[in-house]
Image (tube, grey):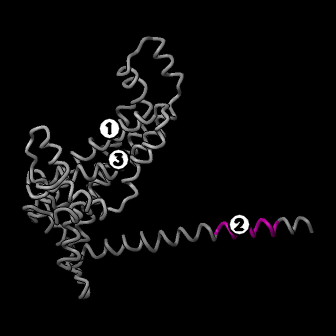
Amino acid sequence: MELGKKKRGINEQQNIAYVFILVPVLLLVVFAIIPIVMALFYSFTDYTIIESPNWIGLKNFTRIFQDEFFFISLKNTIVYTLLYVPLGLVISLAAAMLLNRKMKTTSLFRTFFYLPVLCSSVATATIWYWLLNPQYGLLNQLLGLIGINGPAWLYSSNWAMTAIVIMSVWMSFGGNMMIFLAGLQGINPALYEAADIEGANAWQKFKSITWPQLSKTTFLVSTQLIIGAFQVFDQAYMLTKGGPGNSTITLVYYIYNKGFGGLEMGYASALSFILFMIIFIFSLVNMRLTNTETN
């Protein structure tokens, strides 16, 4: 009898476990796997939302490599990535190293630095729209105090992408800072004590201890930054609408315009898979570089 009760208890626990596993699996299937499969199918069709899709094979993909605006958006996205990823990495790590020191105000500064992550992109864009205003913006006012005539940030094709990068770094560095901070706190203090005994200076300790010990953390943060950079949309949409002169139109923004503006959902799906392959390749390159530095 007791053995039978134990078996029934184990079976009930297994059934409960299966229910808990089934819910996230169903959510993954419904909201991720099925849409991906549908998008893959539509990428080989001329689907326009309002009409039934017709199979056209690889025409969407061949059209991409003949599309001038695809290469413009790709170039803009790569420029954004090359500016955003190193800048976000350096600022996040620097902030984490500053807050890793034992100070009374550390918790307060952690909260302040993390606040931008909690703000919605719409609210953040509204704030930065006025900060970057060429006539009344705070940034140009501060530059004017030191004799620099600030540019028309959002209205100049030379400066609009830089403005979006500045806003993006401000939005995201708090979350990456917390990841770096966790990595810093996981480093064995004995390593720094041994370095102090050997007479190592701050740069030598960073180069020989901090940076190597943070290799896995750096890989995580840099991969997140690369993926986020190639998926940038909100900032360009809210601040510049892709202008001026298509200088801030990004791949995701171009996909949005084609899919929901031009109703070319089949072509937009093909663009999405090209974007996926680009992100995948950059992530692999980043992984290889990180592994090389570690070894």
Rendered location of residue 277, percent (x, y): 28, 57
Give the vertical position of 24 relative to 194 (above or below).
Answer: below
**Viewer-proximal residue, 171 or 197?**
171
Q: CA distance from mark 1 to mark 3?
A: 22 Å
Amino acid marked by disc 2: Gln
Sequence-wise first label, 2 or 1: 2
Residue position for label 1: 289
User: In the image, which is nearer the foreground, mark 2 or mark 3?
Assistant: 3
Q: Which mark is residue 173?
A: 3
Amino acid marked by disc 3: Phe
Q: Which residues are magenta?
A: 7-18
Residue position for label 2: 14
Q: Are marks 1 and 3 in contact (CB under 8 Å)?
A: no
SS for tag 3? helix
| Residue 14 belongs to magenta span | yes
Q: Main secondary structure of the magenta part?
A: helix
Give the vertical position of 183 relative to 271 (above or below).
Answer: above
What is the quadrant of the N terminus in the image? bottom right
Task: Tell me which residue sits at (27%, 52%) in the image.
Answer: 168
**In this rendering, position of residue 245 left or right of residue 196:** left
Task: Tell me which residue sits at (36%, 70%) in the image.
Answer: 36
Task: Tell me which residue sits at (42%, 69%) in the image.
Answer: 32
